[in-house]
């Protein structure tokens, strides 16, 4: 998922996406611990997606506070 797609989402959708990504990261870490993870780089990709979502949430919060 790229930043352009994330920016098109509403704040509620962003928070929902963040929760989904955190759940996915938990599941991937669990798979890694029990040696069932086929692609360890998927953990890195999910972490980057989480960072993108958090960054855009923060940008939205700052923009909304400046407009208020």
Image (spheres, rainbow, N blue to C red):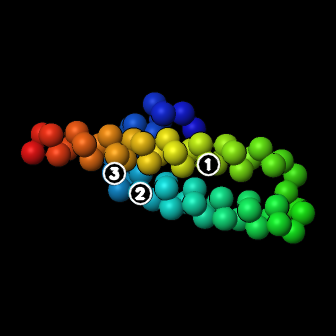
Q: Residue at x 25, y 43 (%)?
A: 62
Q: CA distance from mark 2 to mark 3?
A: 6 Å
Nearest the viewer among 55 and 18 is 55
Alpha-carbon neighbours of circle 2 within 10 Å: few (<14), some, or many (≥20)? Answer: some
Looking at the image, residue 26 lies above or below residue 60: below
Residue 41 placed where, x, y %? 77, 44
Nearest the viewer among 13 and 49 is 49
Alpha-carbon neighbours of circle 1 within 10 Å: few (<14), some, or many (≥20)? Answer: some
Left or right, residue 40 beside residue 23: right
Mark before the other along the chain sequence, 2 or 1: 2
- Quadrant in which residue 7 is drawn: top left
Of circles 1 and 3, which is in front? 1
Nearest the viewer among 8 and 58 is 58
Q: CA distance from mark 2 to mark 1?
A: 15 Å
Give the secondary structure at mark 2.
helix
Mark 2 near mark 3, Cβ–Cβ under 8 Å?
yes
Label 2 sits on residue: 15
Residue 42 placed where, x, y %? 74, 47
Q: Residue at x 45, y 59 (%)?
A: 16
Label 1 sits on residue: 47
Of circles 2 and 1, which is in front? 1
Residue 63 placed where, x, y %? 22, 39
Q: Residue at x 88, y 62 (%)?
A: 36
Give the secondary structure at mark 3.
helix
Left or right, residue 2 beside residue 37: left
Q: CA distance from mark 1 to mark 3?
A: 19 Å
Residue 5 placed where, x, y %? 47, 35
Label 3 sits on residue: 11
Give the secondary structure at mark 1.
helix
- So how many labels did they put on this image? 3
Q: Residue at x 52, y 45 (%)?
A: 51
């Amino acid at each position: 998922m790229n930043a352009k797609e994330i920016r098109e989402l509403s704040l509620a959708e962003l928070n929902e996406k963040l929760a989904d990504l955190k759940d996915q990261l938990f599941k991937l870490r669990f798979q890694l611990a029990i040696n069932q993870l086929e692609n360890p780089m998927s953990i890195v990709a999910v972490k980057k997606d989480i960072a993108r979502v958090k960054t855009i949430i923060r940008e939205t919060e700052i923009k909304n506070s400046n407009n208020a």
